Image: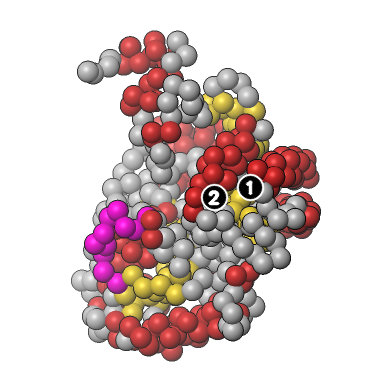
Amino acid sequence: MSTTTAEITVAATGSSLQELARRHLWMHFTRMGAYGEDHEIPIIVRGEGCYVWDEHGKRYLDGLSALFCVNIGHGRADVVQAGADQAKELGFFTNWSYAHPRAIELAARVAGYAPGDLNRVFFTSGGSEAVESALKLARQYHKLTGKPTKHKVIAREIAYHGTSLGALSATGITGLRQPFEPLTPGGCHVPNTNTYRLPHGQSESDLVEKIAERIEFEGPDTVAAVILEPVQNAGGCFTPPEGYFQRVREICDEYDVLFISDEVICSWGRLGEWFGAQRYGYQPDVITTAKGLTSAYAPMGAVIVSDRIAEPFMTGTNNFTHGFTFGGHPVCAAIAMANLDVFEDEHILDNVRRGEPLLRETLEGLRDLPIVGDVRGAGYFMAVELVKDKETKESFSHEESETLLRGFLSGELYNRGLICRADDRGDPVVQLSPPLIAGPEQFAEIGEILRSVLDEAGQRMHVHT
């Protein structure tokens, strides 16, 4: 049965958002069957700074920046106003064979922040689109340069690179891949940098050599790109060993393989630099980005490409035969420019650099809890791994993780006023990614809530002391 706009408006103002959501809204990556009459859908209605409020007026510390993206915090009317002003001047025009001022200005600004000669910017509507675009770019680049068989992409196990079919082939999470198989061909995977669970007999330096070994196994003439996050999200903020990315650069040069730095999360200050590649001192051929580019005040992503890789597309009749209607949308570009103004004017990167040691100290302080096995991450991007036995590093079974995370942790953290991520795409972790404006007050709140909830979780799960 259809519902009129008037009926929806009346219903919504009559406090029946829950009913409307259950009937009509299909939420992403959500077990919809979990929300019955006795289990409310969390409905967030307002945000300011590091906090959001639900429909009942309860306040929560947004310890995840919504989804690693509201970098400058909530409620910035000045940033939104930039989009409104742009809409009055030019609400939309496509970047297909045309240009407009905001996309031009933003492309130049992004290139100015990017490392090395990454001077060409191809806009998308978000992160999966950016990764999809980068993988297509790698394939076409090799065709244009006389190596048409190079099409495979090497990524890491448990890594998340997006949900579109091409990006999903790079994603290394079995549960996300299986429902949509067969996938776009060419996805290959190597070990990630989980040094907390380094296999017996292996050293940290062995991890990067697995990339070279996989290229040799697949055949160098078939491999187009290696795609890696500076700090891997899925699995819980895996950081690179010393020299890891410098060696990746050498391997990619040796085998004529493009090095894609997937920075959908790790760019725009999340690690205390404009880009994660700058944090770890390496030079990729391509950077994929999104999220913090606009601090999520509008949907936007980008692929940032080196002059060398872009050059074959810029000559004669060649072109990158790919695009999206809303790539470089003028309203989104105006919002991105205003967002970056905030970064510069309010010294957001400096705040992350000052705050990182205190955030780390706060989380490291939880190591006395029996359930806390490891604390890792960089910048304002941290994870706490949960274990059954701290001494042996024994993890939880699938059934135990279900009980721990979905049966208790996720709901209890939210009930006590902290939004973060309890995740078991690898071993169970609690992830934190607060807005980049956060400071000591928010860190103290995070530490207090985590300590009480994790202490209770350990008791519930009968964790070894």
Location of residue 370 (image quadrant)? bottom right
Give residue 175's position: percent from left, percent from top: 38, 56
Check residue 204 for magenta coloring: no
In the rendered structure, which disc, 2 or 1, sits on the residue that comes first in sequence? 2
Q: Nearer the viewer, residue 343 or 439?
A: 439
Disc 2 vs disc 1: Cβ atoms closer than 8 Å?
yes
Give residue 100's position: percent from left, percent from top: 37, 49
Could you classify mark 2 by the number of other residues whose Cα lies within 10 Å: few (under 14), some (14-19), or many (20 or more)?
some
Give residue 288's position: percent from left, percent from top: 44, 62
Under tag 2, what secondary structure? helix
Residue 367 located left or right of residue 169: right
Q: Does residue 67 lie above or below 57 as drawn?
A: below
Label 2 to label 1, Cα distance in Å?
Answer: 8 Å
Q: Residue at x 60, y 27 (%)?
A: 53
- Whether residue 123 appears in this view of the structure is no
Q: Residue at x 39, y 10 (%)?
A: 10
To which residue does mark 2 refer? 400
Q: Does residue 382 lie above or below 34 as drawn?
A: below
Location of residue 259 (image quadrant)? bottom left
Residue 426 located left or right of residue 121: right
If the image is split into quadrants, where does the N terminus sit? top left
Amino acid type, callout 2:
Glu
Amino acid type, callout 1:
Met
Under tag 1, what secondary structure? loop
To which residue does mark 1 refer? 461
Q: Nearer the viewer, residue 32 or 380?
A: 32
Check residue 181 for magenta coloring: yes
What stretch of residues is rendered in magenta? 176-186
Could you classify mark 1 by the number of other residues whose Cα lies within 10 Å: few (under 14), some (14-19), or many (20 or more)?
some
Q: Residue at x 47, y 82 (%)?
A: 210
Give residue 128's position: percent from left, percent from top: 38, 55
